[in-house]
Each structure stands twice: as C-alpha cells, then as structure tokens.
Image (tube, coloured by chain):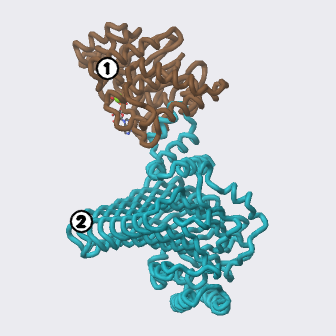
Chain colours: A cyan, B brown
Amino acid sequence: MTNIAEKLNISEKLIATLELEKNSLAGTAHIQAIRKTALGSFTEQGLPHRKNEEYKYSPVSALFKSELCPAKQNACAKLTKSTIAELRIPGLDSHLITVVNGFVSEDLSDYNPNAKSVLVYNTRNTAKHAPALFEKHFGQYASNDADAFIALNTAAFQDVLFIQIADNVQVDKPVVILNVTTTETASLASPRNLIHVGQNASVQIIELYVSIDQNASAINNSVSEIVIETGAKALFYKIQDDCPGLNLITTTQASQKANSHFDTHTVTLSGSWIRNNLNILLEGEHCESHLNGLFILNDSQHVDNHTLVDHAKPHCESNQLYKGLLDDKSSGVFNGKIFVRRDAQKTNAYQSSKNMLLSDDAAINAKPQLEIYADDVKCSHGSSTGQIDEEALFYLKSRGIGSESAKALLMLAFTQDVVNTIRIDALRKHAETLIEKRLSK
Amino acid sequence: MLSIKNLKAGIADKEILKGFNLEVKAGEVHAIMGPNGSGKSTLASVLAGREDYAVTEGAVQFNGKDLLDLSPEDRAREGLFLAFQYPVEIPGVSNINFLKTAIAEIRKYRGLPPMEAKDFLKLVKEKQALVELQVTLANRSVNEGFSGGEKKRNEIFQMAVLEPCLAILDETDSGLDIDALRIVANGVNKLRSENRSFVVITHYQRLLEYIVPDFVHVMYDGKIVKSGPKELALELEAKGYDWIKKELGDVIEA
Ligand SMILES: Nc1ncnc2c1ncn2[C@@H]1O[C@H](COP(=O)(O)OP(=O)(O)OP(=O)(O)O)[C@@H](O)[C@H]1O
Ligand SMILES: [Mg+2]
C-alpha cells in the first residue's frame, strides 16, 4: 500500500512542478497550448501502473523511485567540443546536432544552419519564426492518450528539434543527433524531435544515446515524430551505446505517406532500463517499412522494445527482425503489434523475434500480436528463444578455438543479419566494432 | 603417439565404449571398420573431448600427455584433429574468420608469433587447391549451404590448414562421388609423413585402396574385436561382419 501511495506522490509532485514551470517554459502560443493539453492528459493518466498491459513486463515503479525535477540546461563541465568530437562515429562525415538533457546545444553542434535543404529549428530560439510546416505537424502524430510518457514528454519538453528536409532533396550526409544525458540531480529530460521528410526526399538519421555523469535516478523520456511524405525515404538508426546507467524511454512515432520507405534500426548495447516504442502508421499505399532491432544485455539491464505497425492502406510491406542476446540477470521484452485494417488488402507483414539466453537467470518475454481485418494479406510472425548451439561450439573448440572466443564468434554470428542491413558503411563498421567489444567483455 | 587403454565411456546409463584398446605410432595409418552403432563415432567424439560422453574407465595418452585431462580446444592445440562424420553448419561465422581464429589461438598456445595476413591467405589458397575445394570461403559461413561432398572436403581442407599430428577421419568418404573420393584421399596422402598419424573410420574398402592403412581393426559392440593387415578390409568387404560375430560367439560360448 505504501508503495502505491509513494508512486502517486511522485506522479503528483511531478505534475505540480510542471504546473508551476509551465508558464516559464519558452515557446509560442501554439506550443504553450499543446503543452497545456498534454499536462491535462498526463494528470489524468498518471504514470502507467502495474495493471497497464503495455507496461506489464516493464514496471515503471522501479524507475520513478525518487522525486524528479525537469532537467536543467546547464551541462557538466566535461561536455566540451573535444568530448563531443570523441563521441562521433569514426570515418563518418555527418551533420551533427547535439541535444543535452533535451536542450539543443548550438555550441556543441556541427552543421550548416544556413543550408536550404536541411532546416534545423529549435523552439527556444524565438528570434526565428516557426515555419508553417512546424505548426502543421507538431504534436499531430504522437498522441497523449496513447501513452502517458508521450503526454509527459509533451508537457515537459523545453526544446523541439525540428529537422525539415525539403521536397526532392537527397541529404548529402547522415544527420547525427547526439542525445546526451548528464544531470547531477534526479531529473527528467524530455528531448523532443519533429522530422519532416518532404516528397521524394531522402535522409539518413542516426540518433546516438550517450550518458555522462548521469545521476542514477535521472530519466530521459524522448519523443520523435517523423513524417515521411509521398515517395520519400528515411533511414533511422537508434544506437544506444555508451550510456551506462541510463534510464530511457523513447517513442518514435512515424507516419508514412504513399510510396514511402522507412528503415529503422534500434541497437541497444548499454543502458540500465530502456523502453523503446516504435510506432509506424502506413497511411498511404505502396509503403515499405523495415524494423530491425538488436539488444545485447548483461548484469541487470532491462530493455523493452515495443513495436506497432499499423497497416491502414493496401499494398504495403512491413518487415520486422528483432534479436536479443541476454546474459547474467538481464531481461528483455519484445512486443510486436501488427494491425492490418480492413482496407489494407495485399498487405505483406512479417515479424520475427529471435533471442539467445546465455545464463539461467536471464529472461525474455516475446509477444507477437497480430490483428488482421483484411482477407487478402500475407502475414507471419515467429519467435524463438534458444541457447548457444552446443554442436557449433564443440566444432569451433575442436579446431583449437577457446571457449570464450568460440562463444563470442557464435554470438557475433547471431547479430550478423541485423547488422548487415545497416546501410551506412561507416555506421555498420562502427556497430560491428562496438558489438565485438561488447561481446568480448 | 596415441595410446588408448581399456577405454570405457557412455552416455547417461548406456555404456558405448566397453574397454577399447589401440596403439597408434607416429606415421601409422589405422583403419577402423565395424557395423553401424558399434561405437566408432563415439570413440572419435570422446577423443576430441565432447562433454556429452562420460569416461568411466581407462586412459588415453597423446604425445605423452593425459588426453582426457585436456579441454577440447587444448587437444586440438596439441595436434589432434577430428574430421566429423556430420560437420555442422555455423551460419554467420565466415570460413576465413573461423580459420584465422583457430590458427591464431593454436599458435598462441604453442608460443609462436601470429601469422602474417599474407602468409595466411597463401596457406589457405594452397590447401584449398590441394583438396580442390572450389567454394569461395571468404564470404560464406562455415559449412552453410555446402553440399554433402563439399562439407567433407572442407573437413580435409581444415585438416590440411591446421596440420595436426594425429587426424581422425570419421567416414570422410561417405557421400563423396568417385572423383571427390580420389581427391580427398590424395589430400590425405600428401599429408602423410613419418610424424603424422591417421585413424581412418570407414565402411568401405574402396577408400583404403587410396589411403593404404598399416592396420585394419574391426570394432564391434564398443571394442576392437579383430585386427589385421590391410588385407583384412578386403575380407570384410567380401564376407561382411557375420563371420566375425560368429567367431566371437564361438569364443564366448567356448
Ligand atoms: N548422444 C547419444 N545419445 C544416445 N545414444 C548414443 C549417443 N551417441 C551414440 N549413441 C549410441 O551409441 C551407439 C554407438 O553410436 P556411434 O555413433 O558411435 O556408432 P558408429 O559406430 O559411429 O555408427 P555408424 O557406423 O552408423 O556411424 C549407437 O547405438 C548410438 O545410438
Ligand atoms: Mg559413426
């Protein structure tokens, strides 16, 4: 009983703080109105409680143990240009946008703000006028009522990073969003992105999650809305590495128009408690989406990947492959929902979740959910959980390869099909290096 | 080189090797024949160190070391090689990376410096030619999608690369077409030397026409029940195993 009371308290205190700060948060009347609605929604919902199906295997009570304040902008002294330079992906020429505790940091970013093709707008920068597109799309996709964490983010965000790719522009190099969490106090960072990919445009976005000197109770709750217009193509990579101790909730809400292509990778190698929501609405015909995920966990790490692919229109294809390697007392969740609406004939929707448990104490909960209302569709889902293949292990050992490296080879092999689909060469090499390093730990 | 004394081993409650004895000296080729289920592959597995089998009695000396005391990887590093009857497919592990790792770890164990990349590639190319293994190894996973014959050739190829001092070939001939059989046998013959020994497990005398053994042993019910010169294989081919079983029966009855 005390537990529930405490939890309510934390929720309530958070709401009270947000109420107080609401008016001091920057932004236009449009943004203020959106925040207000979101706060109302969060007040009504509170944090997801134990009985919430969506958070059944990832109870958030463990996360919201202490009182949280909205994160402050002032970053730690360690965050300098040279630290940031070290965090960049080797051999990758990119536009870099650094976001610290949910605040876009112009100083630590490295992109050409005047480039016409890629427009980066941050809402605290009131000198600039909000582009019409921003007002049209912002807050229109991630619904407050769908998830309390969306409402919480929308009520609490400080900045919105708005990336706009103009129609017909093929962005020359990947855009890297460096999402840094560094707070000395127990606080809540709320990064917020809106990415608009214009008609027939294409862009590659890499979101790197990093934590530096993070307070153990701090939480980073981010929301990204991604709009992919007709004929556009977006590759979106989330790399959660180098973020020990990070408590992270990410929601990616994508909306695809006709003939668009959306390719995602969610790679988790680090972090303490992570929930990734990836929701894709296919609202035009002939769309293609790929959802790839890889998580490698140890100690008592917890990672929960929730995907939702909503086929609203015919002739679309979605393909999901999520793989997990779990050691020690780590735990993982894969929950993949596929909706095929009545209109969505000729849908191809595939889903596969494969997991390898490396210890008796590790656990995975994989749950596919297919809801199909159209009759002319091809859908499949599969989930498997196994251990290291002993036959293969013996074969490698019988050739003189030691137990540890033999296991590492097999684990590396297990990750291969996900890694191989990373289309940016430098990123793929980087991921391979990180994974190799991670597996030889 | 290899000395097996009264080896008893099995799985769960089932004893499969029931007092197996064999002496293999440097440079010798021993053939082991015997009916299905007599324990030939089990012997090979126990020697290679498969943990599924429990050794209950006996001793195995390999180059003066207690073989049963070594981990499977250390047995390989000491120079033991097993060509598997059923080589496993390992998706995602490239043949080249696999061999590179094996060589690196074996050399490290033996206190040798790492092999230069170009020497490694040269070695691979040379040995691939030896067994006429035409698959491109670099971008293919270990045995994945290999035909039955290619898998067997790959075993001999690995043996050629790793240059063991004792190789156990478990039915490497089965599943090979006539040309492949000759090629594989040739590969083995080229590796024959006065300090390298072979234990060749086979059902067919044909292989022994190519790889001429110094001794032929008949294994039955977990032990060697008859040994002889290479001509014994011919006799087995002609008469089958019944006469041996009968001989055995006579012995037991007497
Ligand atoms: N892992 C195992 N579990 C249960 N029984 C086993 C196992 N391995 C071997 N056996 C049994 O032990 C006996 C010997 O098997 P083994 O494979 O060694 O025979 P083999 O002489 O190699 O036969 P073949 O000529 O058919 O290859 C068989 O009866 C087999 O079923
Ligand atoms: Mg056998």
Residue A115 x/y as whole percent: 57, 65
Kindly indicate whether the residues beneath marks 2 and 1 are on one polypeptide chain. Answer: no
Quadrant in which the N terminus of chain B is drawn: top right
Neighbor class of circle 1 (other Cα within 10 Å; few <14, some 14-19, many 20+) is: some
Q: In the visual, does B249 lie left or right of A68?
A: left
Tag 1 residue: B180
Measured from the top left, where is residue B66 in percent x and y? Answer: 59, 25
Mark 2 touches mark 1? (CB < 8 Å): no
**Residue found at x 68% / y 82%:** A69
The amino acid type of the residue labelled 2 equals: Lys
Looking at the image, residue A103 sits to the left or right of residue A411; the answer is: right
Q: Quadrant of residue B19?
A: top left
Q: Is A385 situated above or below A183?
A: above
Front-most of residues B28 and A147: A147
Residue at 56% x, 26% y: name it: B67
Chain designation of label 2: A
Q: Which residue is mark 2?
A: A346
**Residue B56 can be seen, yes or no:** no
Q: Residue at x 41, y 72 (%)?
A: A255
Q: Can you tell me which quadrant of the image ligand 2 is in? A: top left
Residue placed furthest toward the left: A376
**Disc 1 C-beta below 8 A from ligand 2:** no
Residue A12 in which image quadrant = bottom right
Badge 2 residue CB within 8 Å of ligand 1: no
| Closer to us: A384 or A109 | A109
